[in-house]
Image (tube, rainbow, N blue to C red):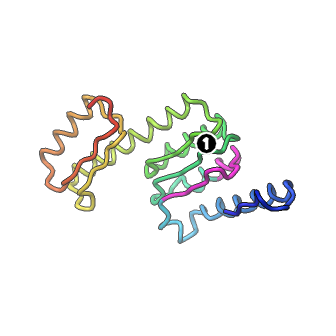
Amino acid sequence: RVNLDLTEVPEEDRVRLGRELLARRIGTLDPANPELEHVTSLDLSRSDVLNMDLEKISAGLKDNVSLTSLSLWGNPAITQEGAKHLEALLKNNTTLVSISLSGTGVPKESQDKIARHISTTRLEKAFSRLRLHDRRFPVMNLAGASLDDEKLSELGRLLRKNTVVKSLLLAGNPAI
């Protein structure tokens, strides 16, 4: 990021430079980029992201298996059109477990829909790890995962058979 707010660079040049830098960051999402497999979060907050940028971002992340967090807060030009690109992305990408959309122009109902989809994906992954006794995950973080009675029953059933999980985080689940 380059902050030119306190410089004498003309606004037109600031905008152009900002767009060029954003285009470079989006360009790194090319699936052929070998470094992308090590990236777990992408912070594009307050970067003047547009709906057309989200189309490119979604295409670049479609088959990505490493990125878990995408921060888009503070981009008011992202609207319902951009949300549709994210919804399409989430149909294919099950790795993303966090997308921040506060301070965007995405309607609340679309933000809620995306959050529900992500929550469901998180739970499915967590339950799968429990079923497989995946030793890489001794801490199970289900904070804010919208657990209801049915999901809590399933979680309890899976935990009775699991010997790997040593810590379970459940804060932010209103049903508990």
To which quarter of the image does residue 66 belong?
A: bottom left
Crowdedness of circle 1 by 10 Å Cα count: few (<14), some, many (20+)? some
Query: Residue placed farthest to the front in the image?
Result: 6
Quadrant (top left/top right/bottom left/bottom right) for the N terminus? bottom right
Query: Residue placed farthest to the bottom in the image?
Result: 34
Image location (x, y in percent) of residue 139: 26, 54
Query: From the viewer's perspective, is 1 left or right of 122?
Result: right
Q: Give the range drawn in magenta.
A: 41-56
Rendered view: 135 above or below 128: below
Rendered view: 155 above or below 18: above
Give the number of marks: 1
Query: From the viewer's perspective, is 12 left or right of 22?
Result: right
The residue located at (64%, 48%) in the rendering is 54
Image location (x, y in percent) of residue 174: 32, 30
Image location (x, y in percent) of residue 41: 50, 58
The residue located at (31%, 40%) in the rendering is 171
Q: Mark 1 points at which residue?
A: 85
Nearer to me, 98 or 93: 98
The residue located at (60%, 61%) in the rendering is 29
Q: Does the magenta stretch include residue 42?
A: yes
Quadrant (top left/top right/bottom left/bottom right) for the C terminus? top left
Q: Is residue 47 magenta?
A: yes
Residue type beneath disc 1:
His
The residue located at (31%, 48%) in the rendering is 141
Query: From the viewer's perspective, is 156 left or right of 1?
Result: left
